[in-house]
Amino acid sequence: MKKAILCVIVFSMIVLAGCSDAIPIEEITDAPEKFLYKQCVVEGRITWVIDVPFLQKDLFKINESTGEIWVYTEKGAPPDDAEVEVRGTFIKFSDIPVIEIAKSILTKINVEIGYCVKLQEIKYL
């Protein structure tokens, strides 16, 4: 009996360790006010990278089955098509430092961003 209970506990811990705490992107984009300035985890495939070389800042878009979201980083962007899990703070795009320069670059390539995740940690899947 004790062995059975121990097996169940160990199995549960293994299963839970493999579970992601990622929030579906659609949940964030449908209610951005609920997540604003809070920690969040999203995961998906990188579909677009925008490098702002002279500022050493990057933006990349993560896409998953429920939607897509932009991520802002000063740590360098992962390569296109990489599967990642991103931890960060959900912020207004206008909160990013030197945003006016980034806005002018994005306007030239016709991209509009209202919110994004400010990267704190990235994990490749």
Image (tube, rainbow, N blue to C red):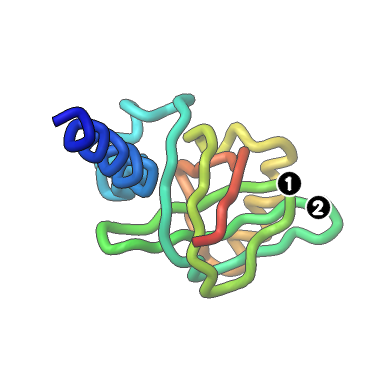
Local secondary structure at mark 1 = loop
**Residue type, label 2:** Gln
Q: Residue at horizontal 41%, vertical 60%?
A: 44
Figure quadrant of the N terminus: top left
> What x and y, as percent, mark residue 63?
39, 63
Taking the image as shown, residue 12 lies to the left or right of residue 40, namely left
Taking the image as shown, residue 1 lies to the left or right of residue 80, namely left
Tags 1 and 2 touching, CB below 8 Å: yes
The label shown at residue 56 is 2
Q: What residue would you read off at disc 1?
A: 74
Q: Residue at horizontal 31%, vertical 26%?
A: 34
Q: Residue at horizontal 33%, vertical 42%?
A: 23
> What x and y, as percent, mark residue 14?
35, 44
Which of 44 and 108 lies nearest the eye of the viewer? 44
> What x and y, as percent, mark residue 36?
42, 28
> What x and y, as percent, mark residue 68?
38, 58
The label shown at residue 116 is none
